[in-house]
Image: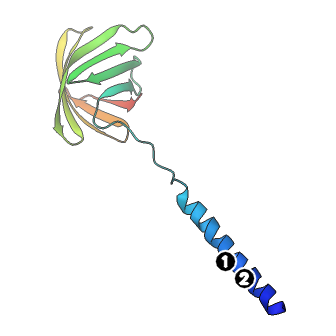
Amino acid sequence: MRRIAVTLCLAALALGACQSERAQMSRPLPQAPSYPQGVEGRWASNGGPIAYTAVFQNGRFTSAERDTNGLLAEGNYTNSGSSQIQLNFTSIKRGVQIAANCNHGGGQMVCTSSDGSTFSLSRA
C-alpha cells in the first residue's frame, strides 16, 4: 500500500512539472521595441537652438518648429543604402539649399550636411 502511495505521489509531481513547463513554453517571449523600417515617419530633433519635428514620407522631407509648427525646411530624400539616406532640402529661414548624408538605425539618425555640420534626430 505504501509503495502505491509513493508511486502515485511521484507520478503526480511528474505531471505537475510537465504542466508548469508547458505553461512556461506557451507564454510569449518579451520582444525588443520595434521601429518602423527605414526613415518613414516622424522624427524629433536632438538639441540645437530650435526644437523641431521632421517628417519623412514617400521621398519628401519637411521640418517644422515644435512650438509654433512653422515650416523650417522642405525637400526630398533618397535611400543610398540599407541604413543611409541622402537628404536635399531648402532652409526656409536662410533661403539656401542644403545636402546631407544620414545614417539611421535603432530609432536614431545622425546627419552630416555639406558644410560639415551635424545634426541628430530620434524617432518620435
Task: Compare residues 96 and 79 and report the one nearer the observer.
Answer: 79
Query: Which element carries disc 2, helix, strand or loop?
Result: helix
Q: Which residue is drawn at 60% across and 61% down?
A: 23
Quarter of the figure with residue 67? top left
Q: How far apart are marks 1 and 2 (CA)?
A: 6 Å
Disc 1 crowd rating (10 Å Cα; few below 14, some 14-19, many 20+) is: few
Which residue shows up at 41% across the image and 41% down it? 34
In the rendered image of this protein, does residue 31 appear above or below residue 118? below
Q: Residue 35: x percent and y percent?
A: 38, 38
Decide: is 98 above or below 108. above
Q: Which label belongs to residue 10?
A: 2
Question: How far from the left and from the top, in percent, is residue 63?
Answer: 31, 17
Q: How is the image coloured?
A: rainbow
Query: In the picture, residue 87 is in which quadrant?
Result: top left
Q: Are the two marked residues, 1 and 2, in contact with CB atoms closer than 8 angstroms?
A: yes
On screen, residue 80 versus residue 43, left or right, reads left
Question: Which of the labelled discs sits on residue 91, or is there none?
Answer: none
The percent coordinates of residue 30 (x first, y second) are: 51, 51
| Residue nearest the viewer, comparing 61 with 89 | 61
Disc 2 packing (10 Å; few <14; some 14–19; many ≥20)? few
**Location of residue 113 with respect to 106 vertically, above or below:** above
Name the residue tied to disc 1: 14
> How many marks do you count on the picture?
2
Residue type at numbered disc 1: Ala
Query: Residue 65 at x, y = what percent?
Result: 38, 13
- Amino acid type shown at disc 2: Leu
